[in-house]
């Protein structure tokens, strides 16, 4: 075993079993602490249980105490002092929760993307910082395993490119939250309703939609129509399947404020008995989910945080709304939720 200080071994033991929000980041974060603290031998680590070289910031009040410390370059400054290894673990995440690191969660599904993102803020003077941290990951993995980490750990090497988050509240609130999280794309799922024979596939995009958004919508609508043996919505525009700004403006406001490509899906009509019957079967739900997941993988190959919004469900202003009645029983939002959850599973397993 590499030469760790006693406090660093204690830190690794506690961190190995700690319940943290993004367990797949444990190895990269422990690797960062190895680097920052010289495997726990820095005086800052030994005296103040600060393994991250965290300088004092006012927002750390309540999580740490300010301590005077002179670093290896003989520069004195105020740093964070912690009274236990657990206080340090908590304090580290609190430190990242400060405004300079806003948006880091969008990279939380990928340890490399995570460290690349925070490195430029954490250690702007060192271009090799994230590379140095990444090179310590195998050692960090081994240390975590020796320290009692069992279950979560295997996820490190098989991290998915995608993480999905469901947004609720009123539609504007959802869009703003997705903006704040820097989501790569936004999908709101509905089903259409009209007469019993209506049967086209439609995607609504906002009036301000980009060409990428329109192409993504066309791609989805076309694939759904071919799955269901239906047609795509025929607009008075050159974009088959897509209603820019919504039909008579419907759906425009659900997407208009999203700062990333955003689409509203109306793949089929729940008022159509045949389509409603299909929707009630798991295999058709899965097929719809697969088309959505595939379209996201195709249009956003770099991965990131995906925003899902279940149409109608969870609105503050109208909490009981569940959308249109489905022929034969049930409501639109129940099925939108089923399909989106299946799509989320596919994306997070990168089964696309
Ligand atoms: Zn709807």
Image: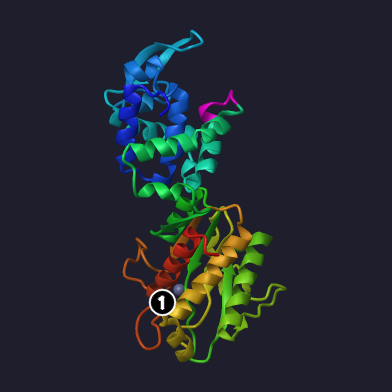
Q: Is mark 1 within 8 Å of ligand 1?
A: yes
Q: Quadrant of residue 143?
A: top left
Q: How far from the left and from the top, in percent, is residue 158? A: 49, 52
Left or right of 12 on screen, residue 264: right
Q: Quadrant of residue 57?
A: top left
Residue at the farthest left position:
83
Q: Look at the numbered disc 1 and give the secondary structure of its residue.
A: helix
Residue beneath disc 1: 332
Q: Is residue 91 above or below residue 229?
A: above
**Which quarter shows the N terminus?**
top left
Which portion, as a residue range, is magenta?
121-126
Q: Is residue 131 visible?
A: yes
Q: Is residue 265 magenta?
A: no
Label 1 Cα crowd, 10 Å radius (few <14 / some 14-19 / many 20+): many
Instruction: Name which residue lies at 54% across and 55% down.
Output: 258
Q: Is residue 34 above or below residue 252?
A: above
């Amino acid at each position: 075993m590499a030469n760790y200080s006693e406090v660093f071994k204690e830190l690794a033991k506690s961190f190995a079993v700690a319940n943290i929000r993004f367990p797949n980041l444990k190895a990269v974060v422990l690797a960062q602490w190895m680097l920052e603290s010289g495997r726990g031998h820095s005086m800052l680590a030994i005296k103040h249980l600060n393994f991250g070289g965290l300088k004092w910031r006012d927002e750390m009040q309540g999580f740490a105490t300010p301590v005077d410390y002179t670093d290896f370059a003989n520069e004195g400054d105020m740093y964070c002092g912690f009274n236990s290894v657990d206080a340090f673990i908590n304090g580290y995440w609190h430190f990242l929760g400060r405004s300079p690191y806003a948006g880091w969660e969008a990279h939380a599904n990928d340890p490399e993307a995570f460290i690349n993102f925070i490195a430029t803020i954490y250690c702007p003077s060192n271009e090799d910082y994230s590379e140095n941290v990444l090179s310590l990951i195998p050692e960090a993995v081994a240390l975590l395993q020796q320290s009692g980490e069992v279950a979560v750990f295997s996820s490190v090497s098989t991290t998915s490119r995608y993480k999905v988050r469901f947004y609720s509240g009123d539609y504007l609130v959802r869009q703003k939250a997705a903006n704040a999280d820097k989501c790569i794309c936004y999908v709101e799922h509905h089903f259409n309703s009209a007469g019993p024979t209506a049967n086209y596939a439609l995607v609504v995009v906002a009036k301000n939609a980009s060409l990428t958004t329109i192409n993504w919508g066309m791609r989805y609508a076309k694939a759904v129509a071919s799955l269901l043996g239906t047609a795509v919505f025929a607009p008075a525009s050159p974009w088959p399947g897509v209603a820019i700004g919504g039909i008579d403006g419907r759906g425009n406001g659900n997407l208009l404020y999203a700062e990333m490509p955003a689409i509203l899906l109306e793949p089929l009509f729940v008022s159509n008995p045949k389509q409603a019957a299909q929707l009630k079967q798991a295999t058709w739900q899965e097929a719809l989910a697969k088309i959505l997941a595939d379209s996201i993988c195709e249009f956003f190959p770099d991965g990131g945080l995906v925003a899902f919004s279940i149409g109608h469900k969870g609105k503050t202003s109208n909490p009981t709304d569940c959308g249109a009645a489905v022929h034969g029983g049930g409501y639109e939002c129940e099925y939108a939720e089923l399909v989106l959850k299946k799509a989320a599973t596919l994306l997070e397993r990168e089964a696309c």
